[in-house]
Image (tube, rainbow, N blue to C red):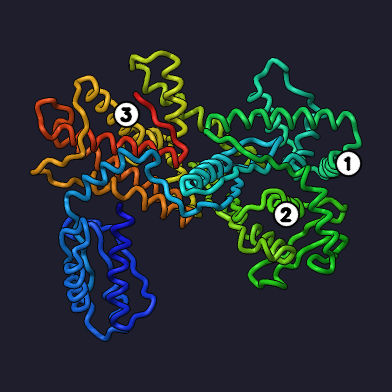
Amino acid sequence: MKEELLSKLNQAITSWLNDKGIENPEVHFEQSAMVEFGEYSTNVAMRYAKELQNNPFDIATELASFLETKKINFIEKVEPAKPGFVNIYLKKNFFAKQISEILSDSNWGANQSLSGKKIMIEYTQPNTFKPFHVGHLMSNAIGESLSRIFEISGAQTLRANYQGDIGPHVAKAVWVMLKKGKPSNTLSVSEKASYIGQCYVEGNSAYEGDTDAKREIDELNEKIYKKSDKEVNALYEWGREITLEAFEAIYKVLGTKFDRYYFESEMATLGKKIVLDNVDKVFSESDSAIVFEADKFDPKLHTRVFINSKGLPTYESKEIGLTVTKFEKESPDLSVVVTAVEQADYMKVIAKAVSILHPEYENKMQHVSHGMMRFADGKMSSRTGNVIAGESLLKDAQEKVLERLSGKEFTSEEKNSIATKVSVAAVKYSILKQALGFNIIYDFEESISFEGDSGPYLQYATVRAHALIKKAEDEQVNESTDMPKDWEVTTLERNLSRFSEVVTRSMDELEPHHIAVYLTELASSFNSFYGQGKIVDINDSSSEYRVALTKSFYKTMKNGLYLLGIETVDKM
């Protein structure tokens, strides 16, 4: 309905500008921040004042008068505003119609912008033999949200996870385990994975501070690549299996299920072959290594090693194999990769090499980067051991939520379920409320608060709405989208009507934070609505419309939280 309204306005304004000699004008509408300025405004009068050789306000006045004559459905009035805006006011029945549309639409918020497109999105990417740290949590939250936004926009979406199961980091962990042995078999998978991660930290410390250890680890790395030692092979396979199993448990809690898994060990051979086959064409030899001198193709880029002097493929070479494999096997219209911003320059070099090898892929690769999560001690590093494990962060949040639920009359099973969902919401929202590319200062107490700017706050608002809906059912107060005659349109109604355009904007810009910010504003407007008077009252003639508004809010919040990868709860 809204799309149709804005389309008619666009056509009318475009026609008006065409008649004045402006060809192919760009007409944009903004949702007004304040009620007194209407629901929408456009700045075309200011945008084309120079071409029209007239004062912007005079142009806006003329355009407003023209639009008034068009008698477009749902428009109450059109007024000019200084310095040159055209403000558009909607009739009350527009909002009533919008509520009716929300309640009847089985896929409220969806659009078909990406219909017929196949999008593969790669995210999370934890390395076996290393801890699952907060960086992986960030990539997972962003990647899962984008996946859901692609899906609601009509795309066939493939979730991919690329994991490092070979390379120096593996050799460092295995080197320590060869000396210390496996942990007790009585430990849980999570505890075994934690032991392996600690072995990696110890191995990395030895590699950086002991020349003999460095030599031994480098030799061990070659053995792992060649699978030439039975004892090493057995320990490697055990460690790989344990860490992958531990990762799957975390994915389940986070609500992610991957469609495709790729591993460095599988990409190494292919990547090396592609590089060697293109020496002197794309790649070149340098000090017994094979490099890509990307700066020859783009001065903003730099040279990177793709095969080292020992003949082993580097991360860069494996990345080439991965990218080619994804396109050859899946033929996506778009391949999106989510990583930390510190890998942005690295990914640009990879993209340049791939685009030279396969020009047809050049416009089908998209890199999405996020900042770092910082705590009181600064950036965490899994190399030094000064690391906050992603699983630990989730567990700490869960324990804190359980403390807050201690006085509630819930069963133990209900408390654990609620605490898990609320802790995930706390962490995910803290990540997704921030525009991509910027660092996050994680405030633990703020993240689990049931009030203010947090995931649990949004869940609590849905709990309140759900309770009202249940009360209306119990008291047999039905919903009605017939707006009471003396009804004043609320901020809640205005915010509800924005949901679809916010989803579309998040899809266009690959920015989930637009949805996160919107949901916070929506929850705030609902809480204000809640405080303005009794919602469920069999003796109040406006109660049926209030119930319809509450159901519309609940549905919008539930759909919006789903797009953030956050589950709703029925009680808190």
Residue placed most toward the observer, 461 or 105? 105
Q: Based on the displayed image, in which of its 4 quarters is residue 133 positioned?
A: top right
Q: Which secondary structure lies at badge 1?
A: helix
User: Measuring 29% from the left and 80% from the top, which residue is drawn there?
Assistant: 19
Q: Based on the displayed image, in which of its 4 quarters is residue 416 positioned?
A: top left
Tell us which disc is closer to us: 2 or 3.
Answer: 2
Give coordinates of residue 53: x percent, y percent.
27, 86
Q: Which secondary structure lies at badge 2?
A: helix
Q: Amino acid at mark 2?
A: Val
Give coordinates of residue 364: x percent, y percent.
61, 59
| Crowd band around label 1 with a 10 angstrom C-alpha radius: few (<14), some (14–19), many (20+) | few
Determine which residue is flagged by label 3. Answer: 463
- Return the disc, 2 or 1, that comes first in the chain's sequence: 1
Determine which residue is flagged by label 2. Answer: 324
Q: Which secondary structure lies at badge 3?
A: helix
Give coordinates of residue 481: x percent, y percent.
21, 39
181 horizontally vs 89: left or right: right
Determine which residue is flagged by label 1. Answer: 226
- Return the disc, 2 or 3, that comes first in the chain's sequence: 2
Distance between mark 3 and mark 1 Cα atoms = 56 Å
Tell us which disc is closer to us: 2 or 1.
Answer: 2
Q: Amino acid at mark 3?
A: Val
